[in-house]
Image: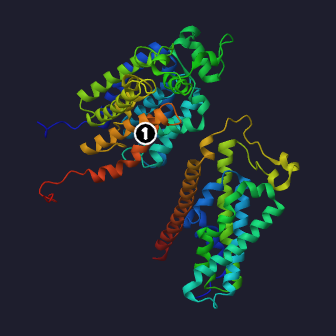
Amino acid sequence: MSQPTYREIVVNGLWKQNTGVVQLLGLCPLLAISTSVVNALSLGLATTLVMAASNGAISLIRNLVPKEIRIAVFILIIAALVTAIQLAMNAFVHPLYLVLGIFIPLITTNCIVLARTEAFASKNRFMHSVADGLMMGIGLTFILVILGAMRELIGKGTLLSGIDLVFGTAANHWVLHVLPDYKGFLLAVLPPGAFFALGILIAGKNWLDQRAAKTQSNRSISIVPHAE
Amino acid sequence: MAFVSTPTSVSAVMLKVLFALVPAIAVYQLYFGPAILVSIVLASVTAIVAEALMLRLRGFPIRPFLLDGSALVTAWLLALSMPPLAPWWLIVLATLFAIVVAKHLYGGLGNNLFNPAMVGYAVMLISFPAQMTQWPTLTTLAQAHLSFADTLHYIFSGTLPVSLKLDALTMATPLDTLRTQLLLGRGVSDISNMPVFGYVGGKGGEFLALAYLAGGAYLLQQRLISWHIPVAFIAALSLLALGFHAYDAARYATPWFQLASGGAMLGAFFIATDPVTGATTPKGKIIFGAGIGLLVFVIRTWGGYPDGVAFAVLILNMCVPLIDAYTQPRVFGHGERKS
């Protein structure tokens, strides 16, 4: 198998194979945590860190692990990394750790992490694998943050609420009250809102792709008469 | 003659459905004031604008689809389901959600999975429980003497004439009262002497139920709906109510009360009978209607919301593909049952 270029890794991770709106992997935390920008960004970054580290670690041992037991070994490595991140969050951003709760340890079972280690890291070189984990993670974080922003804005009329969980009470005035005196649209914060918002994002991505494909084909058609 | 009947267009059907709603609107207006007319106008305008916009976005011809009237039916049913003194944005938002999301994003008329009016209602009930549970009752309205200008002013600005308070205008609905008073340990017969109750159901509401029944009878007579869904709905609801009432008359309301309260009649004849989102086979329609009746009773009696028609309809909408698949009539000469 030929090694993909870094450019391909970046394009796949951020757009073409985006975990959130194309592969639709790891939807449980995506839908459950994206109630606000701060939650979404925190879980996205934690997942990115785990993905980059686990991809790198598994790429290093890819030729040593017997094929039959590779999944168990992968999960073990991922679980160890997640535990490290969980302990670190507990120590340094304890309030956020309490908010994200079970979804931090659940990164272990997030199928996107295992999918990338199995599909990419177990076949590719170390640096490529780290880059793939990083890009896939950033792609996921990107979608998570957009979802979080949509839901927080429509649901509560604010952005960045809960930022004090990360930077302490001094950060309270960073919260943007975009829509002052807003009554709140509870549905956006509830689970159905997550599904609606994700559906809209997927539709938007498909629309952009179709439009791009159309201009591409228009261009190629317009070339043909000149070639005659 | 069955084979030479003239094809009825969607718009003719929808016009008759709107016509069948007129008696109910008249009764509503008579008892609960002109606010319902404002709601209907608001919902209709929003529905037509949203429908035209969505048709344009989806690349459909606007005129023929807009003239089919299905958006208007959704708007009217929604307006009749919402609290009459709801602020204008609540009605507009509910209608937008019904038309844009529940109807067009799910594929437009003929493809939508869920009853649009009930989606709009349920979304508002979940998102704005405070505004969605402010129902004026006959007694409070009679004391308030709210003029048409006052009503309009309240719907659009949210402020009442100085002499009035919203708390004085709205009260718990009969179904709500029944629930809370039962929780306080009072018996059904004791509760139904409270001023909010009339002869068998809520005061005024029971006549509204009769008007819906009349409209439903017209729809049946015109063969716009078949008897299966309403009859199964009403039978399931009343049989359950009858059984539980017979078991413990102090804790379970009479079947009459169940039928005459809340959205039971509106649901049975106008909402559950939606041809797009309901079951299509005769046997399936009976299962569909009975399922809604069952769930309405369950939600009203043990659920967290006072009335369950919207949720019951939406849940059974979800079951429709399954119901239809299992009740497909056997094609003559094929797949004979082994005996």
Above/below status of B49 relative to B84 = below
Identify the residue shown where x is 50% and y is 28%.
Answer: B82
Quadrant where the image shows the C terminus of chain B:
bottom left
Identify the residue shown where x is 55% and y is 58%.
Answer: A202
| Count of numbered badges drawn on the protein | 1
Between B181 and B237, the residue placed more toward the observer is B181
Give the x, y percent position of residue A40: 69, 57
Quadrant where the image shows the N terminus of chain B:
top left
Q: Is residue B112 visible?
A: no
Q: Is residue B190 visible?
A: yes
Numbered disc 1: what chain?
Answer: B
Give the x, y percent position of residue A17: 58, 70
Give the x, y percent position of residue A108: 65, 69
Above/below status of A116 relative to B67 = below
Give the x, y percent position of residue A203: 53, 56
Residue at the bottom extreme of this rendering: A64
Mark 1 Cα shell of 10 Å, populated few (<14), some (14-19), many (≥20):
many
Between B3 and B169, the residue placed more toward the observer is B169
Label 1 is placed on what type of residue? Ala
Is B298 on the left-hand or right-hand side of A127?
left
Q: Find disc 1 in the rendering and name its residue.
A: B312
Secondary structure under tag 1 reads helix
Is B7 on the left-hand or right-hand side of B37?
left
Quadrant in the picture for residue B136: top right
Is A73 on the left-hand or right-hand side of A97?
left
Between A68 and A127, the residue placed more toward the observer is A68
